[in-house]
Amino acid sequence: MKKLPEEYVKRMKVLLGGEYGAYESALEKEPVRAFRVNTDKISLSDFEKINIFGQEKIPYVQNGYYLNFDKVGNHPYHHAGIIYVQEPAAMAPAECIDINPDWKILDMCAAPGGKSSQLKNKLSEKGILVSNEIIPSRCKILTGNIERLGFTNCVTTCMDSNRIANLFPETFNMIMVDAPCSGEGMFRKEEIAIDEWSVDNVKRCAKRQSEILENAAKALAPDGYIVYATCTFSLEENEMTIDAFLSSHPEFEIVPVKEDVEKATESGIFFEGCSCADISFARRFYPHKNKGEGQFMAVLHNKCENHFSYKPKTSPIKIDKSVFSFLDDTLEDYNKENVAIYGDNFVYFPPNFEIKKGSAFMCGVTIGELRKNYIMPHHQFFMALGKHFKRKIELSPDSEEMKKYLRGEEFAVNSPNGWAVVTTEGCTVGGVKVVSSVAKNHYPKGLRIKGTQT
């Protein structure tokens, strides 16, 4: 690994004391890899029957495992959205509190989607997840991951924290603030963070984090929770930011995390001038203490009584009858009230949450586009609603047909004509149109595997 900046070493020696040597030694080891099971696609019990990626479970994540598999992104199970690869320490913030499955949740700094997908697995069909990312290229990656995982009831937005707070005042029961930071906790995994580190950058990040936290407070409903997280160790970006926020927001309190996360982490640090007596409730994840990179997290609770009731403004929308004809022919069942129009596409999204025109990068499940009285289905439609399809083509993950499908090729099939989903272990990989016993491939070109790899 690259040499650490002298000023950083000096600061960490003050922070860790006698533990600094163990920390430095940990940085010379290989980063720990991990993954989560997408329980929106497959149950844990069913996944364990097919698990080839690693058997050791992460103690604080019910559906988390340490990864022991190469080229996981090429495997059909990954294409099917059965798993999500994520650094293990980064999984801890979403496990800090018990989540009501009917909540409305905002992930304010969401790309590439690890924490968003983890939170979505905890929601029911009545819950809503809004995942925001300010950088358009990263928002596109975020949206792609949500599509691959087959989520419904999700919205992605691409805006700054001030705009999203003004768009959704006092709306969310929980907000994840995985704040952009100086990245000290990622030095072992991403050496570019070492090159970019400076005390000035730490201070700039702390200022930006405070602004994001202020805007999160505006979007939070009374009695709601903010989970603040960074992947850095500096006091300025962590405990000092939390202490300053609590000092200016008497309606908030810091509360303990769940026991499993507490056991895997170290207490927050009380610093000179700290006014929060319970700052130890904040948690720190160190690479020399547990399997993973650096992480900080704190849970902030709005103590105000929840008098707020979200009431969306909805108006009747006329849907072209060809859309319902397409859905009736394709799906075994669906909720007609969820069919709407957003932008140029027909979407599947519950009417009990208002998304203003032009505010979302992606709104719900994109059904498809109307073309001369027929619907051209979107890849997300197959991935999210595949379990409701009338026509399913189950393929073994190591079959020749699956290899052909992931390469974008046609293959012979015994299925009635019409739109169908390709599945493996009952989980959708993508869509095809069956014509005279031939599956016409509709797997997106950007996702296809080149050559003979699988």
Image (cartoon, grey):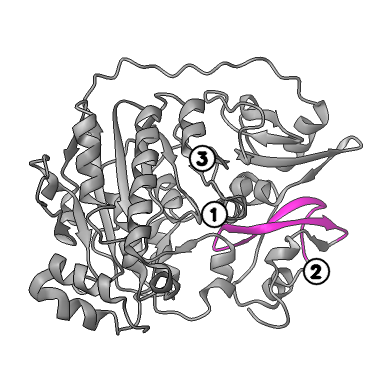
The residue that mark 2 highlights is: 412
**Disc 1 secondary structure class:** loop
Overall secondary structure of the magenta stretch? strand
Check disc 2: other Cα within 10 Å, few if <14, some if 14-19, many if 20+.
Answer: few
Rendering coords of residue 166 (x, y %): 48, 26
Is 424 covered by the magenta stretch?
Answer: yes
Rendering coords of residue 421 (x, y %): 68, 55
Is residue 302 positioned above or below 53 on the image? Answer: above
Report the front residue among 68 and 274: 274
At x 36% / y 84%, what residue is drawn? 1
Span shown in magenta: 413-436
Q: Is residue 94 visible?
A: no
| Amino acid of disc 1 | Leu
Q: Give the number of the mark in front: 2 or 3.
A: 3
Quadrant housing residue 225: top left
Report the front residue among 48 and 256: 256
Q: Residue furthest right?
A: 372
Question: Considering the image in quadrants, where does the C terminus appear?
Answer: bottom right
**Disc 2 secondary structure class:** strand
Q: CA distance from mark 3 to mark 1?
A: 25 Å
405 relative to 27 in the view: left or right: right
Check disc 3: other Cα within 10 Å, few if <14, some if 14-19, many if 20+.
Answer: some
The residue that mark 1 highlights is: 149
Q: CA distance from mark 2 to mark 3?
A: 48 Å
The residue that mark 3 highlights is: 160
